[in-house]
Image: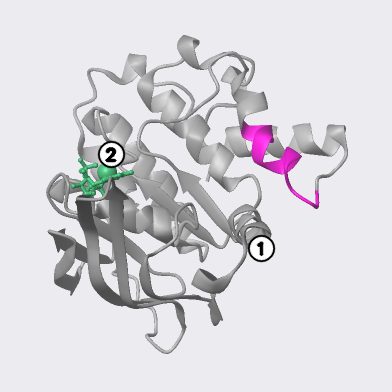
Amino acid sequence: MPPAPAQPAPSPSDCVIRLVGLDKVYQSGAENSVHACRTISLEIARGDFVAIMGPSGSGKSTLMNMLGCLDRPTGGEYWLEGEQVAAFDRDRLARVRNQRLGFVFQGFNLLSRTSALENVELPMLYSPHCPSRRALRRRALACLQRVGLGKRALHHPSQLSGGQQQRVAIARALVNEPSFLLADEPTGNLDTRTSLEIMEIFQDLNDKGMTILMVTHEPDIAQYCRRQIVLRDGRIVRDERVSNPLRATEELKRLPRELDFLADEAPSA
Ligand SMILES: Nc1ncnc2c1ncn2[C@@H]1O[C@H](COP(=O)(O)OP(=O)(O)OP(=O)(O)O)[C@@H](O)[C@H]1O
Ligand SMILES: [Mg+2]
């Protein structure tokens, strides 16, 4: 089958994230400081799908945590949809996080003593627009079905595989219907097929208009994104568009079939 046509590059004029000289210095003790991000300037257009790459310690998670409003920069500007979020107070940052951003953490960060369904419901419980109990449940279940885990909704994380736990974490990030999805190593420690299934979910979300920023240290996985940014020692050293991103659905069809009996429900498109 011929490869799917390349998606048109998002227009730079529709810039929804703009970083100007963003800096992050971690201060631990009077003498010890780590300059984790150094004057990062960057524009990201709505609908882009960006891989953030670079060696361990290069500042990828630090950058993602600032983009996700989980941590504040120590210098520079962060503009999100035209607003300077670095100046927001805690409550306003929490609202931005809750209403506009979905975050998939490095390591899944699921609550171990609650079911997949309850894990997914959690961000909605803290939302000012929290729906009724019944609507909450319906929406969380729809998100789990979206990532192919409808039948595992009542399982606890310990009863799920790594890939399934990662999909619960993605469902949780989607439940508030964010415009931006930020994912830190979403395929870390996953086998090839499971990684491609995660990329298939991300590409489908991106095709529907979601802006996605994803940290990965795997060049193979970055081939599914539309743009690749490489950090080294807290600075951007490369920023390139991918001319013809791979399509995960097509690549999944090419994988050997012998392990298919292990695969569970396919994610619903
Ligand atoms: N809370 C913190 N306090 C002090 N230093 C920190 C803190 N978090 C990260 N660092 C340091 O900042 C630098 C960048 O760390 P970061 O976690 O952003 O790297 P990374 O690129 O995500 O690495 P990895 O690929 O291993 O996840 C590292 O030198 C790290 O030790
Ligand atoms: Mg990291």
Q: Position of residue 223 (x, y in %)?
A: 20, 56
Assess whether residue 10 is covered by the magenta stretch.
no
Q: Which residue is mark 1?
A: 92
Residue 96, quarter of the rendered image: bottom right
Q: Amino acid at mark 2?
A: Leu
* Mark 1 closeness class: few <14, some 14–19, many ≥20 residues within 10 Å: few
Sequence-wise, the earlier of marks 2 and 1 is 1
Q: Taking the image as drawn, is residue 113 in sight?
A: yes
- Along the viewing direction, whichever of 94 and 100 lies nearer the viewer: 94
Q: Is residue 85 left or right of residue 225?
A: right
Assess whether residue 125 is covered by the magenta stretch.
yes
- Name the residue at 37% across, 22% down: 162
- Name the residue at 17% across, 67% down: 235
- Name the residue at 31% across, 76% down: 42
Question: Any atom of ligand 1 within 8 Å of the CB at mark 2?
Answer: no
Q: Position of residue 82 (x, y in %)?
A: 54, 82
Q: Taking the image as drawn, is residue 2 in sight?
A: no
Q: Is residue 160 left or right of residue 4?
A: right
Q: Main secondary structure of the magenta part?
A: helix
* Residue 252's disc number: 2
Residue 6, compared with residue 248, is above or below; it is: below
- Name the residue at 20% across, 68% down: 242
The residue positioned farthest toward the bottom in the image shown = 13
* Residue 111's disc number: none
Q: Is residue 210 left or right of residue 4?
A: right
Span highlighted in magenta in the image: 120-129
Q: Position of residue 241 (x, y in %)?
A: 21, 72
Question: Helix or strand or loop: what does disc 1 sit on?
Answer: helix
- Along the viewing direction, whichever of 121 and 221 lies nearer the viewer: 121
Q: Amino acid at mark 1?
A: Arg
Question: Helix or strand or loop: what does disc 2 sit on?
Answer: helix
Residue 148, compared with residue 83, is above or below; it is: above
